[in-house]
Structures are given as C-alpha cells and as structure tokens.
Image (tube, rainbow, N blue to C red):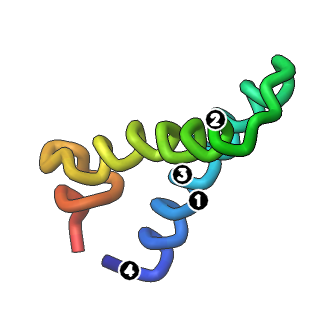
Amino acid sequence: MTKAQLQAMLGSYLRAAASAVAALYMSGITDPKILANAFIAGLVGPLAKAVNPKDTSIGIGAKK
C-alpha cells in the first residue's frame, strides 16, 4: 500500500466518523459516550470497503 493510498484510506475513515458525530451533535445529543459510539460506528462503512477484495480503490483489493 502506498503512502497516498494510506492517506486516502485514513481520510475516508475520519470523514465518515466525524460526519456521524457531527450529525448527532447538531441534533442536540451531547453525551460523550454516545458521541464516541457514533465515531466508532462511523468507521464501519470505510472498514467494510477496505476489507472488500473486489474494491480496487483502497484496502485489500487495491493494486499495489
């Protein structure tokens, strides 16, 4: 995995997790435990993409 691919992958993870937290926070939920859970839940989508061998953009299916 190249440095550019790693940066793209990490950026995708962080954007997804931050979006989940921001959506809850803007709706008035400010409990840190719930926001932490939302952050973790926001990582599920990008992680699923990373472990998909048919996805050639990032993750285990990416071209070296």
Check disc 1 and give the amino acid type: Gly
Which of 3 and 32 lies nearest the eye of the viewer?
A: 32
- Please give the count of numbered marks on the rendered protein: 4
Q: Position of residue 12 (x, y in %)?
A: 54, 51
User: If you read the primary sequence from the N terminus, does the residue marked by circle 3 or circle 4 appear first?
Assistant: 4
**Where is 64 relative to 41, above or below?**
below
The image's mark for residue 11 is 1
Q: Earlier in the sequence, mark 2 or mark 4?
A: 4
Of 29 and 41, nearer the camera is 29
* Residue labelled with disc 4: 2
Labels 2 and 3: the sequence-earlier one: 3
Kindly identify the amino acid type of the residue bearing the numbered disc 2. Ile
Mark 1 vs mark 4, CA separation in Å: 14 Å
Q: Quadrant of residue 1?
A: bottom left
Q: Which mark is residue 19?
A: none
SS label for mark 3: helix
Horizontal and vertical percent position of residue 36: 62, 46
In three-dimensional space, the C-alpha distance between marks 3 and 1, rounded to whole angstroms, equals 4 Å
Q: Secondary structure at mark 1?
A: helix
Which disc number belongs to residue 12?
Answer: 3
The residue identified by callout 2 is 34
Q: State how far apart marks 1 and 2 are (Cα).
A: 22 Å
64 to 34, vertically: above or below:
below
Residue positioned 74% across, 26% down in the render: 23
Task: Tell me the quarter of the picture where residue 28 sits.
Answer: top right
Q: Earlier in the sequence, mark 1 or mark 2?
A: 1
Tell whether label 2 touches label 1 (CB within 8 Å): no
Q: Depth-wise, is mark 1 or mark 4 nearer the camera?
A: 1
Question: Mark 3 touching mark 1, by CB under 8 A?
Answer: yes
> Where's residue 41, x and y in %?
48, 38
